[in-house]
Amino acid sequence: MRPLKRLGRSFDKYWYGWAMAAPVVIVMLVLVGYPFIWGAYLSTTNADESNIGHDIGVNHIPPSYHSVGLHNYWDILSGNDGHFYSTLTWTLIWTFVNVFFHITIGLGLAVLLNRKIRFRGGYRLMLILPWAVPGFVAAFAWRLLYNDNGVFNAVLKYFGMHGVQWLAQPTSAKIAVIAVNVWMGVPFMMVSFLGGLQTIPKELYEAAEMDGATAWQRFRMVTLPGLRPVMMTVTLLGVIWTFNKFDVIFLVTEGGPAGSTDILVTHAYQVAFANIRQYAEAASYGVVILSMLLVFATVYRRSQAKLEVQA
Amino acid sequence: MRRSTAAKRGAGIAAIAVLALAASACSSSKSGGSASGSAAKDPASVKGTVTWWDTSDATNEAPNYQPIIKAFEAKYPNIKVNYVNVPFSDAEDKFKTAAQSGSGAPDVLRADVGWTPAFAQLGYLQPLDGTPALANDSDYMPGPYASDHYNGKIYGVPQVTDTLSLLYNKDLLAKAGITTAPKTWDELKTDSLQIKAKTGVDGTFLNAASYYLLPFIYGEGGDIIDASAKKITVNDATALKAVGIAQDLVKSGAAVTDVTKDGYNNMQTAFKDGKVAMVVNGPWSTADDLKGSAFSNADNLGIATVPAGSVKAGAPVGGHNLVVYAGSKNLDASYLFIAYLNDAQNQATIAAKNNVLPTRTSAYSDPQVANNKILSAFEGPLKNAVGRPPVAGASDLFTPLDTDYQAILGGQKSPQAALNDAATQFAQILPGFSKS
C-alpha cells in the first residue's frame, strides 16, 4: 500500500509532469514493450512461417505452434546449432577492432582539427561527409571498390600485380567490412571528441605549459582526463552500435563468403527471413543478443563509475 | 541469381498431372461454385486495379511488357494495371513478408516454379481452378504445368520455361583452335586451359550458386534429394564426385569463379565483354549477353547442352508461373489479366523479344518464335533437362547449399564436411526425410 500511496501523492504533486510524459511512455510501451514481450514469448515456442497461422482470402490457417520451453536457448548456447560460438567470436573481434579504430582515429582527427589551422571548416566538412552518406549508399559504393573490376584491383593491376577477390576469402572479407565500418564510424567519434575538447578549460593547458609539460604530457594529463565523460559515453554507444551493425555486413558481403563475416544480428536475420522463416529461433537469438548487451552495459558503467570515484 | 524449379517430372507424372487437371477442371465447372460464377461474368463489367510484381530483368526484359499492358488496359477500360518490377533475388522474401503481414502483397506475382508449391502450401495463393486465368489450358506443356499443381488444385499458370545450357563465344573457341563446344566436363577443362593458353582470356566462369551445381550432380547420375525414397542424397558418393569436378575446374585454373554477392553480375559482365569464353546459364541471360561487345554479332553466341559427367548430361528445368495472391481484392481482374498476358500470341511476342521459352505448345509454331535462332538453340538442352523432385520445400534447399558450395569453392571446408552440413540443414527443411 505504501508505494501506491506514495505514487498517488507524487501524482497529485507532479500531475503535470506525468501528463507530459504519458504519451511517450504509452508509445514506448506499444512500440518497444509489446514486440519485446511477444518476441520473448515466441522464443519459447517452435513458431515458424508454416505454423504461425494467418487468414488470407479464402485460406484460413490456424496457428499450430506450441511451447518448447527453453529448447531454442539450449540449442543456441550448447553450440548445437553450429553457428553461435563461431559467430560470437567474430562478432567480438569485429566490435573490438572497430571501436578501437573509431576511437583512436576519431580522437586523432579531433585533436588535429581542434588547432587553429587554415581551411579548418573545409576539413571538418570533408571528414563529416562519410557520416552524412546513408549507410546503404556507402556500403554499395565500397562494394564497387572491392569488386573484381573495382578501383582497388585497377590500382593493383596498374602496378603489374594480380587483382584480389577481396570479398571472396574470409580474412580479406573481414578486413574489408571492418574498413567500411571504420570509415563510416569515425566522423561521429571525431565530432563527439571535438565537442569534448572544447569543454576543457584553456587555463589548464596554460598552467601545464607554465609547468613545462611536453605536448605528450599535456595530452595525457589534461586532454584525456578532460575527455573521460565523453569517451565513456561514446565507447558504450560505439560498442552497442557496432555489435548490432547490420547494414555494413549485410550489404557488403551478406555474411559471406560462406557465413564467415556473419555477426550475431545478421545471422539472426538470416534465420528469421532468408529461407524457411524460423521465427522462434530468431527470437531466441534476439533475446540472447539483448542480454549480452545489457550485461556489458551494466558491467561497463559500474567499472567506469568506480574509476570516477578513484579519480 | 538462382533459378529453381519443380517443373518437369517423368513423363508418367506429367501425364498424371494432366489427368488430375482435367478432372479438377471438370469438377469445378460442374459444381458452379463462386469461382466459376466469376468466369461467367461479363469481362467488360470487371473493375479494379491489378498490381503485378514482375521479376524479369528490369533493363532488358521489363520494357517489352509495357505494350501488352497498354493493350490490355485498352481492351478492359475499367481495369488498371499497376506494373512493379521487383528484382528476382528479392521477390521471394518481399512476397512472403507482404503475404504474411496481410498488406502490401501484389494481386499477381511472377513466381519461380520452385516457389509455387511452397507458397501454395503456406496458403498464400488463390486456387485458379475454373477461373478465366486457366483459359485454353490444354495448350500448356505438361512439364511446366505440373509445377502449378499442389494438393489437387491449380495455383498458377506457367509463363516461361527454361533450362541451363553451355553458352560460348564462338570467336574465342575458334581462336584457340577448338571447333566444337565441349561435350563433357573433361573436355571443358582441356578446352578452357587451351583457350587460356592461346588467347589469354579465361576459359570458363563458374557461377558459385548451388543451382548451377546441379548439372554436375545430374551428370554423375545423382540428385540432391530422392523424393520417392524420402532420402537426402546431397552428401552421397555421387554428389561428392560431382562437387570434386567443379572444385577441380577452379583449382586447375580452367575455370574462374566468384563467391561474393556480385558473382552473377561479374560472370555476365566478363562473358559479354569477351573476357571469358564459356559460361553455364539460362535463356533469360541471352538478352543481356547480346548487349555486350563480344556479341554485337549475335551469331557469335554459341548454345549447347551442358557438358556431361560420367553418366549423362543434364540441367534442371526452371521457369516462372503467374500466380494470384489469395488476399487479392481484385481477383476477377487478376484472372483476366493473367489470361491476357499469357495467351499464345502475347507469349510468343515476349518469348521472341526476351529470348525466353514459351510454355504454350501453340506459341512454338508462331513465326516469331520458330524463326528465333536462340530459342531454337535451346530446344536440344530442354530435351535433356531434368525435372526436380515435387516437394514443397525443394526451393528452400538452395539457400543452405549455396553457403556450403561457396565454402567448398573458396577452400574453407572440405567437400565432404560441407555437404554433410548441407544434409543436416536439409533435414530441418524436409521433415520425414532421412539422411544418408
Image: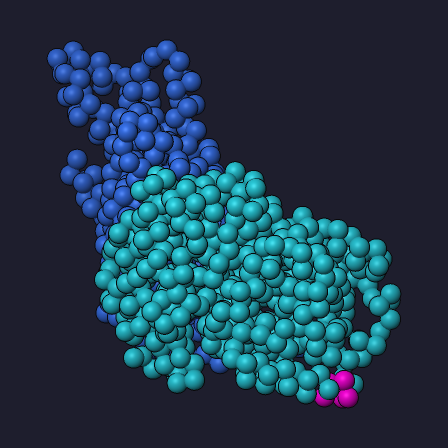
To which quarter of the image does residue A310 belong? top left
To which quarter of the image does residue A126 belong? top left
The residue lying at 43 percent from left, 23 percent from top is: A125
Q: Position of residue B206 (x, y in %)?
A: 38, 53
Position of residue B111 in the picture relative to residue B423 (left or right) = right
The residue lying at 58 percent from left, 55 percent from top is: B374
Q: Chain B drawn in what color?
A: cyan
Position of residue A15 in the picture relative to residue B63 (left or right) = left
Per the image, is B30 magenta?
A: yes
Depth check: B415 or B247 in front?
B247
Chain coloured blue in this rendering = A
Q: Position of residue B141 (x, y in %)?
A: 63, 73
Residue A165 sits above or below residue B79 on the image: above
Per the image, is A296 magenta?
A: no
Residue A115 visible at all: yes
Residue closest to the far left: A212
Q: Position of residue B173 (x, y in %)?
A: 42, 47
To which quarter of the image does residue A48 belong? bottom left
Depth check: B105 or A52 in front?
B105
Q: What type of secondary structure mainly makes up the magenta span?
A: helix
Residue B72 sits above or below residue B39 on the image: above
Look at the image and give the residue range highlighted in magenta.
Answer: B27-31
Residue A178 visible at all: no
Q: Position of residue B124 (x, y in %)?
A: 59, 71
The image's colouring method is: by chain
